[in-house]
Amino acid sequence: MSLQKKLNTWKEQQFITAEQCEKIAAFERQRAARTFGRSAFIIAGLLIGLGLCLIVASNWHALGPVIKLAGDFALLGGLFYTTFWCITHERKGLTELFTILSFLMIGATIGLIGQTFHLDGGWHSFATAWALLGLPFVVVSRALFFNVGWLCLFFSLFNNGWWEKIFDFLFDSFNTGTVSAVLCLCLLSYAGKKLDETAHPYTLFPKAFEKLAMWLAYLSIFGIGLRWGTSGWNHHLGTTLLANLVVFAFLAGRMFLAIQTQNMISFRRNAILTEIYIFILFASHLSNLFMSGVGFIFGGLAVLALIYVFKHTSLYIKNMEAFK
């Protein structure tokens, strides 16, 4: 139902007055206009930046080292000044755009200097310099994904194979260590959430740390399920059942916490993830059927059925007594 229809219904039911209805509609129109304007600025800025990059790239070999460095630092200084201007004039949409562009430009500048002067050090030195020099822009940014990305870059400094070792540990074997790792990620996410409640409201790092830990926990749980829970029914029945039990226990635990905190969005998300995982379990044992013409028809109908289930799951959760 559109907003205008909802407003009309609320007005007819006398939940709101005609004056309140008009104020809500005006506010939503203004917010939509701001969102459109910000999106337009971001898209235009990215297109212009991409066009400049393509022009420079096509003439890269014709430019001398001095011209390359001078142009790079001039652009970097321009981005810094523009970011500062946007912050002081409270242009939130443009601030996010130029903050991210400035951070990316710092990485490009480090790469250009290393290429020009043939510096050694590899990825580790590059990531260290980029993470440290770009930290002020990450602190200024209000983009959660940007902060999470910086944390990933920062954690990669400790070891070049940090991510590979984690995933090898989680997915190459299934034992108490993998379950303990997921529990540790959940505890880290909880610690980040508590730290975020006491941190300065403009600091996103605790929240980004919380989200990163929880995303890794979900990725690990589904990695365990897809690696060990959807295969091996004939030869590794015990391991398969245990892996599925771990996945469902994790999702059920998240839904229980969502009820305790009255977080309907989190409950709905985990309920839908549970349905997706059940769908994957069935689909993994019908793989041969999906490779035929009848299988494609069956697959399409199964997807439609899944969409139908998602829709009614959301409606059911919305009307649950637990969230009244």
Image (spheres, rainbow, N blue to C red):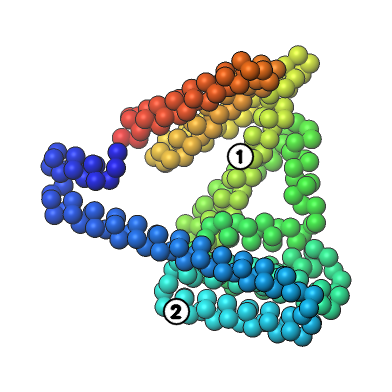
Quadrant of residue 8 within the rendered picture = top left
Location of residue 209 (image quadrant): bottom right
Residue drawn 69% across and 41% down? Answer: 181
The percent coordinates of residue 128 (x first, y second) are 74, 68
Is residue 83 placed above or below 148 in the rendered structure? below
Q: Position of residue 275 (x, y in %)?
A: 53, 27
- Contact, mark 1 vs mark 2 (Cβ under 8 Å): no
The amino acid beneath tag 2 is Thr
State whether residue 287 appears in this view. no
Mark 2 Cα within 10 Å, few/some/many (few <14, many 20+)? Answer: few
The quadrant the N terminus occupies is top left
Label 1: few (<14), some (14–19) or many (≥20) C-alpha neighbours in 10 Å: some
Residue 250: image quadrant is top right
The x and y percentages for residue 101 are 59, 69
In the structure shown, which secondary structural element does the residue marked by tag 2 occupy? helix
Query: Closer to the camera, 2 or 220?
Result: 2
Q: Residue at x 54, y 81 (%)?
A: 81
Q: Amino acid at mark 1?
A: Tyr
Residue bearing mark 2: 88
Q: Tell me the distance, in whole angstroms, between the alpha carbons under discs 1 and 2.
A: 39 Å
Relative to 59, residue 217 above or below = above
Disc 1 marks which residue? Answer: 218
